Amino acid sequence: MKSFKSSKYNFFFKTEEGVKLAFNGISGGFALIKKENEKIISKFIENPNSKIKNSREEKIFTQLLHGRFIVDSSIDELSLLKMRFWNARFNQRNLGITLAPTLNCNFKCVYCYEREKNANKPIRMNDKKIEVLEKFITNQIKNGVKNINVGWYGGEPLLEIGMIEKISKKIIDICNKNQIPYNANMITNGYLLTEKTFKPILHSGINFIQITLDGPPDIHNHFRPLRDGSPTFSIILENIKRFVDFTEGKVKVAIRVNVAQENYNAPFELLKILEEEGLKGKVAIYPGQIVSDNSQIVCLLDNSFSDIETNFIEALLEKGWSFELPPLPRSVYCSAYLKNSYTVDPDLNLYKCWEAIGIDKLKVGYIDNDGRIRLNEENLHWLSYDPFEFEECRKCKFLPLCMGGCVSKIMEKGPDYAKIEHGECPTLRNNLLKKLISYYKFKVERTKFEGK
């Protein structure tokens, strides 16, 4: 006879109004607990092997099994997470490359982590390097890659839109020839997002763009001026408006608001401006945490930023904006964990994270003239970092949702730190339940609106 147990990754909680909810971190199962079902659910959660008395109890028990709130006693949930993690990490079928065609930038952001470390680096990818990059893509497909995702980064990538279009055409042609799916995105400051770049962006297969606006004009212009100190807010805003109208939804646009102590209210102020400018429903917007050693910026503590995140979701909900789905289980925290994912600088040096670009000690190798990857010992440090080594992570209910957190932060501190300390917990640990409650409210309001 089968026996069962409650999942160690269950969260049971309620809204301020007393509505009871349930969430399972390993499955992403999210459920409303109806008052008439509370006692039956409690019965099976407290003792999953309780006798099922009738068809109603059988239905509820089946639903709890489906959502993985209850699992077979033989299942080791931690081992299941390990299997997901390692399978994803060494998947050879997917290739993720973040390409920086240039390290040059037209901005002088006060919190920039790239400016000084890249001062003496090659700032532009030349034609010879592009040819090598083409060989690299071809070699990867020969080695079994079945899906390619390209991210454009910098510097400021739109300084080299011609090069981006040229490289994209080569990669797209290779993918089409081999019937390989291709996907592309871009992170840009938006200043050069003009009519001259609209069509090249579409021709390059880019379907998602992230643009940064750090609040209302005075704050943004202080944080993100041109290199000569000139303001940038109004030009970027007008560019965004024209771009979303031109692309008609073909390219999703997300606006990131970098937040520090100095501009903690910026996301809320910017939201009002975007709505006034007719961008509601055309762009997404979210706050990002500034983490910088720059003395000009006072960074927020994780718990303070977590409060801003949840309060901002409430503001989106109140004003009828859409927002991201509830937190979902993941196999790895981000692509920096993956064996077949790299950031490539203009000289074809390889890194595991775009925030590592230009930091020599974090370089994991390079692409040689034949388009082959040459890796070094640093690559082993990244790929051997294992959150399951840490007791704190193994015991944590949030593990399926973060899988060890930001490996880049660990590696910047050195491999010895990774061996003796612990994972870098994301802010989700502070505000998961608040985010889930906001999402529940969003679903309720949308259901009312749709008349269901």
Image (cartoon, helix red, strand yellow):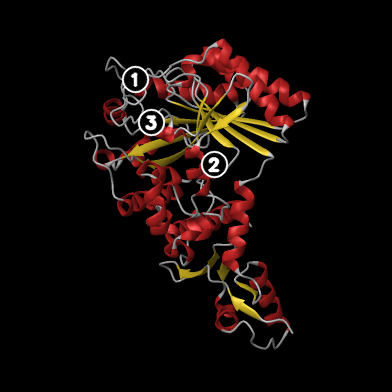
Percent x, y for residue 352? 50, 37
Q: Quadrant of the N terminus?
A: bottom right
| Residue at screen point 43% across, 20% down | 103
Q: Is residue 128 left or right of residue 437?
A: right
Mark linked to residue 213:
3
Q: Write down the quadrant of residue 167 in the picture.
A: top right
Q: Write down the quadrant of residue 294 in the picture.
A: top left
The amino acid pointed to by label 2 is Ser
Residue annotated with mark 2 = 335
Residue 112 vs residue 40, the one in the foreground: 112
Other-residue count near label 2 (Cα within 10 Å), few / some / many at <14 / 14–19 / ≥20: some
The total number of labels drawn is: 3
Q: Is residue 244 above or below residue 293?
A: above
| Residue at screen point 50% across, 59% down | 388
Distance in Å between CA atoms under marks 2 and 3: 25 Å
Distance in Å between CA atoms under marks 3 and 1: 25 Å
Other-residue count near label 3 (Cα within 10 Å), few / some / many at <14 / 14–19 / ≥20: many
Q: Is residue 52 left or right of residue 120?
A: right
Residue annotated with mark 1 = 119
> Which dot, 3 or 1, sits closer to the camera?
1
Of the image marks 1 and 2, the number of the one nearer the N terminus? 1
Q: Quadrant of the C terminus?
A: bottom right
Residue 17 vs residue 206, the one in the foreground: 206
**Tag 3 secondary structure:** loop
Q: Is residue 74 visible?
A: yes
**Residues tagged 2 and 3 counted as in contact (Cβ below 8 A):** no
